[in-house]
Image: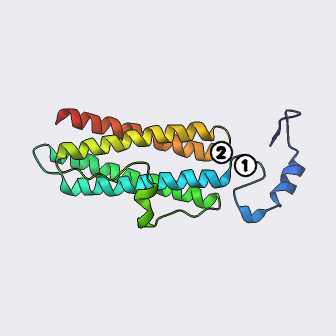
Amino acid sequence: MLNLETSQLTSVQDLRARARQNVDQGAVTEGYNADREEIIKLLNGSLATELVCVLRYKRHYFMASGLKASIAADEFLEHAEQEAEHADKLAERIVQLGGEPEFNPDLLSKNSHAQYVAGNTLKEMVYEDLVAERIAIDSYREIIQYIGDKDPTTRRIFEDILAQEEEHADDMADIYNAL
């Protein structure tokens, strides 16, 4: 680890000695600079967001009907699967940081950044998915800025998810404009 006062790397002996301290904390070492509890809270809010999005996309997949429904339904299913992958990455990181991922269904919509709005028509469904993606984009961008250099692993997870959420928003905007 870099010693900021002297701009030198920590000696191998010191790294080895520090690694033997607090081994029960797993990946969270002395060099972890973020507020772990706050990061876990942000991760759990994002986990809820992803799970709510999975549920909404799955509903839309099954409920899509009309002339252009098959194109939208294919996107709904693909996005549901990708949102589930995001949820898995977030839950895994929560555990790595010593937290517990919150999967309680009673708390998901309460903790989610995006709302669960079902929509009745295909256009309403696509609209609600686009709105949810836009919420996730702004939310994750703010989280990335908040984390900064304090937790590069969590930041990278959010950056990867953000990139895919932007793709989802583009997909939904294209479908919305074609309806």
- Where does the image place residue 3, in percent across and percent down from the top left? 84, 38
Q: Earlier in the sequence, mark 2 or mark 1?
A: 1
Identify which amino acid the numbered label 1 is placed on: Tyr
What residue is shown with label 1?
A: 32
What residue is rendered at 42% in x and 66% in y? Answer: 106
Residues packed near mark 2 inside 10 Å, few (<14), some (14 to 19) or many (20 plus): some
- Where does the image place residue 141, in percent across and percent down from the top left? 51, 37
The number of callouts visible is 2
Q: Are marks 2 and 1 in contact (CB under 8 Å)?
A: yes
Q: Is 119 on the left or on the right of 9, as rendered?
A: left
Q: Quadrant of the N terminus?
A: top right
What residue is rendered at 58% in x and 36% in y? Answer: 145
Q: Is residue 155 visible?
A: yes
Identify which amino acid the numbered label 2 is placed on: Asp
Q: Is 67 on the left or on the right of 64, as rendered?
A: left
Q: Is 152 on the left or on the right of 158, as rendered?
A: right
Residues packed near mark 1 inside 10 Å, few (<14), some (14 to 19) or many (20 plus): few
Position above or below: 4 against 70? above
| SS at badge 2 | loop
Position above or below: 66 against 148? below
Q: Quadrant of residue 61?
A: bottom left
| SS at badge 1 | loop
Q: Quadrant of the C terminus?
A: top left
- Where does the image place residue 95, in percent across and percent down from the top left? 60, 61
What residue is shown with label 2?
A: 151
Q: Nearer the viewer, residue 16 or 99?
A: 99
Q: Residue furthest left?
A: 67
C-alpha span from label 2 to label 1:
7 Å
Q: Quadrant of residue 37?
A: bottom right
What residue is rendered at 64% in x and 57% in y? Answer: 97
